[in-house]
Image: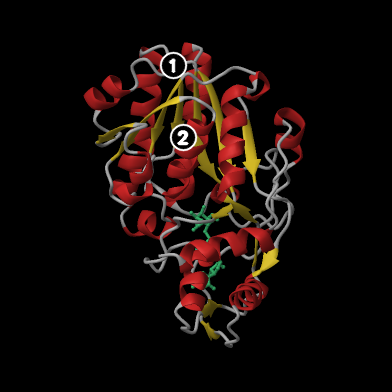
Amino acid sequence: MKKINHALVTGGAGFIGSHLVDELLENGSMVTVVDNLSTGHRSNIDHLNDRIQFVEGDIRDAELINRVVKGCDVVFHQAAVVSVAISIQDPPHACDVNDLGTVQVLDAARRNGVRRVVMASSSAVYGDDPCLPKSEEMVPKPLSPYAVQKLTGEYYASVFKKLYGLETVCLRYFNVYGPRQDPTSPYSGVISIFMDMATTERVPTIYGDGGQTRDFIYVKDVTRANFLAATESAASGKVFNVGTGKFIRIRDLWDLIGKSSGVSMDPVFGPPRSGDIRESVSDISKIGKHLGFQPQVELRQGIKDTLHWYRSL
Ligand code: UD2
């Protein structure tokens, strides 16, 4: 297990990135954050102002990214256009950020002696494959520009390892939730939207019959997976699912959030969202075997903690 001396977190003012910064500081690392604040918020890292170096800037800016990566031994690449819907509305923009941006980050890393890059990938690469649970050996079937871009990032990671000896690890996140997830866009994570509805006593909409399943993982478990991916030697060159291996139906999720928040409201059912995936659950045996990772936060507990945060806003 290697220590992380100085980490660069791209997208470190975002939902997952900012929790990762918290985790790195708790583990005694120095941290630099680069974020263009397009979807991230300064408020996510305000509490760390005097403990990190924050650089407002874009990962596509080669001069900037080469400058900020200097002296870092690990890069956590979280910055991206994270919305599948936006990638469908504007594929060139999403491609520019998600692919060119990723190549700039990888290139800056290999030019400046970074030991390892840990990349945020997505369960989106599996598409709607009916085989369950989704395991890393399955042939990817991307269904959106976003999924293609995340898969392309994985291929670049593998090529940079082979060509330049840069250690890379790709983490395929399933549905991540927790404090700081922004509920304000219609494409925000469903847990953040349902929490917002529950705490303001508004009726949520369930798209379709609510029988679709998701594997929800608490953000702190995701940051721990990132930490292990950066420090365990067995991780280098590999792709891992980051999920819980458990699933819940969306209509049961609303019941759970309603119960936890003490509201009892029937949801409205709307038409299914186009391109919605029906079943999603991860196989986490690979990350368990190679990194010793096991999720620690049960959905019920994670929802309680997240609700506590939404109520404090
Ligand atoms: C997740 C990721 C996305 C991509 C994708 C890959 C999030 C926020 N998004 O999309 O980035 O990786 O997985 O497959 O993690 N729903 C409702 N009512 C609402 C909002 C959502 O019923 O108000 C449903 C929605 O139709 C879907 C489920 O809840 O069936 C989850 O939706 P989501 O947007 O949280 O995440 P998902 O799985 O579509």
Mark 1, Cα crowd under 10 Å, few <14 / some 14-19 / many 20+, is: many
Location of the N terminus (image quadrant) = top right
**Which element carries disc 2, helix, strand or loop?**
helix
Mark toward the viewer: 2 or 1: 1
Question: Residue, x 34% and y 47% (percent of image)?
Answer: 94
Residue 282 position within the rendered picture, expressed as x and y whole percent measured from the top left? 69, 50
Give the amino acid at mark 2: Gly
Could you tell me how far apart the alpha carbons at marks 2 and 1 are, in whole angstroms?
18 Å
Question: Residue, x 60% and y 73% (percent of image)?
Answer: 257
Q: Quadrant of the rendered structure where residue 279 is?
A: bottom right
Residue 109 position within the rendered picture, expressed as x and y whole percent measured from the top left? 39, 19
Instruction: Using residue 61 as the reference point, say whether residue 243 is left or right of it.
Output: right
Question: Residue, x 37% and y 32% (percent of image)?
Answer: 51
Give the amino acid at mark 1: Val
Residue 248 position within the rendered picture, expressed as x and y whole percent measured from the top left? 69, 65
Question: Residue, x 36% and y 57% (percent of image)?
Answer: 86
The residue that disc 2 covers is 153
Residue 114: numbered disc = 1
